[in-house]
Structure formats: structure tokens, C-alpha cells
Amino acid sequence: MKRMKPLVIGIAGGSGSGKTSVTRKVMDVFHEHSVVVIEQDYYYKDQAHLSFEERLKTNYDHPLAFDNDLLIEHIEKLVARQPIEKPVYDYERHTRSTEVIHVSPMDVIIVEGILVLEDERLRKLMDMNLFVDTDADLRILRRIVRDTEERGRTLQSVIDQYLSVVRPMHNQFIEPTKRYADIIIPEGGENDVAIDLIVTKIKTIVEFEA
């Protein structure tokens, strides 16, 4: 028998903190049978109305960069057991893609992103809030690898963006959301003990067959 209401888990933390690693390890246990992941960075605002030069100035670490209205609408639909069409963001064009991803409702909804605990409306949808807390030197190294290999960025552009935008935005907007976390996970995906505790908690709430 399915739960009447899906369990919604928010996983926040700085860029490169290991949020995705934590999410993947949870998914590895459940094999996508009961869990769906909604990534906040798929919900950056559509910027098709702006020139490419103007898009390059986007501060992706500021709360206003996200289309939280659409994100909230989609979470509410999934909670109501309705499917959604999740947007896709094109990081080379710096705007939303024309593609979408069909997502079916599941018993557990993981909402992952740097600022998922910043918006009070999002927090009210969460049943459990996690914050992945990782040292800044590890976060910047992971961001360099991701942005150069997956998003077509140069090393210098990643460093410049980190110093001018990412670090100050982390201190101003992301780090303060730690106070809303029910569980703080040091070192992200490397913290097997914390992940095991989270998985155990999910299993106690959601009917699950291995």
C-alpha cells in the first residue's frame, strides 16, 4: 500500500559540498523504485528574452536566479501524486532548454539544491531538511572539475566567478540556511554513517521492498 502523502526531503549545502553524492547514495539503496529527485538547478529562470551577453552576467548563486514558483508548483503536484514535466537548463546558452523530463510521482521526493532551504515556501513543503557541510577548499575544487568538464567553462572563469560571486553568496545566503536543517552532514557523500541514518529513517517511513 502506498503512503497517502509522499515524504519530501530537502538536501541543501554549498556548491560542490557533496549534495549530489548524498542523493546518489540514497538512490543506490532504493534503486529508483520509491524515490524521485528534483534538482533545484534545473529550475533556473528562463532567460531567452535576454541577449547572450546579458545572460553571462547572471548570478546563479543568488536566490532570485531560481524559478521557485515553478519548483513549488511541481513539488505540490508530485505530492498530489500527479506527474510533472521537469525543465532542463542549458548551461552553454545560459537559458532554459526546450527539452523537458517527464517525472512520475513516488513515495519519496528529494529536492536538492544550494538554496532549497532559503525560501520559506519550500521549507514548508519539506518533511525532513538536510544540510551538507563541507570545507570551502573541497567545494571549490569540485566546482572547478564540474564546470570545466560538464559546463564548458574555463579554469580562470570558474576561479573568477568563485571569488566574485560564489563565495560571497555562500556566506550571505547559503550558510545561514544551516539553521533550518534537521540533520547536518559533514563531508557529504563520504559520510557513510550519516547516509545510513538517513536511509534507515526513510525505510521506517516508507514501505520498501529490497
Image (spheres, rainbow, N blue to C red):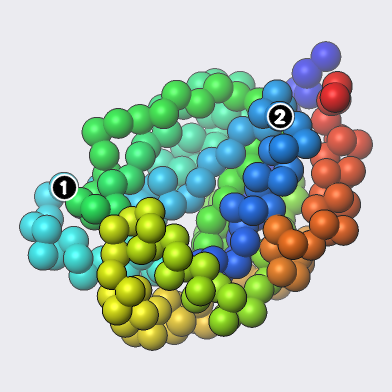
Report the residue at 28% width, 75% height from top: 157
Report the residue at 72% width, 46% height from top: 25
Numbered-mark total: 2
Report the residue at 54% width, 41% height from top: 38
Q: Is residue 61 left or right of residue 171?
A: left
Q: Position of residue 4 (x, y in %)?
A: 76, 23
- Give, as a three-letter code, the residue at label 2: His
Crowding near pointer 1: few (<14 within 10 Å), some, many (20+)?
A: few
Instruction: Name which of mark 2 and mark 1 comes first in the sequence.
Output: 2
Q: Position of residue 39 (x, y in %)?
A: 51, 46
- As measured in the structure, the alpha-carbon distance from the residue carrying label 2 to the one carrying label 1 is 36 Å
Query: Could you tell me which secondary element the residue under label 2 belongs to?
Result: loop
The residue at the far top in this view is 1
Whether residue 176 is visible, yes or no, is: no
Residue labelled with disc 1: 48
Taking depth in this image into account, of 34 and 137 the one nearest to the observer is: 137
Q: Quadrant of residue 181?
A: bottom right
Q: Position of residue 54 (x, y in %)?
A: 13, 65
Taking depth in this image into account, of 121 and 68 the one nearest to the observer is: 68
Nearer the observer, disc 2 or disc 1? Answer: 2
Whether residue 96 is situated above or below residue 19 in the rendered picture: above
Q: Is residue 21 left or right of residue 148?
A: right
Query: Could you tell me which secondary element the residue under label 1 belongs to?
Result: loop
Whether residue 173 is situated above or below residue 23 in the rendered picture: below
Residue 31 is marked as: 2
Q: Position of residue 197 (x, y in %)?
A: 88, 52
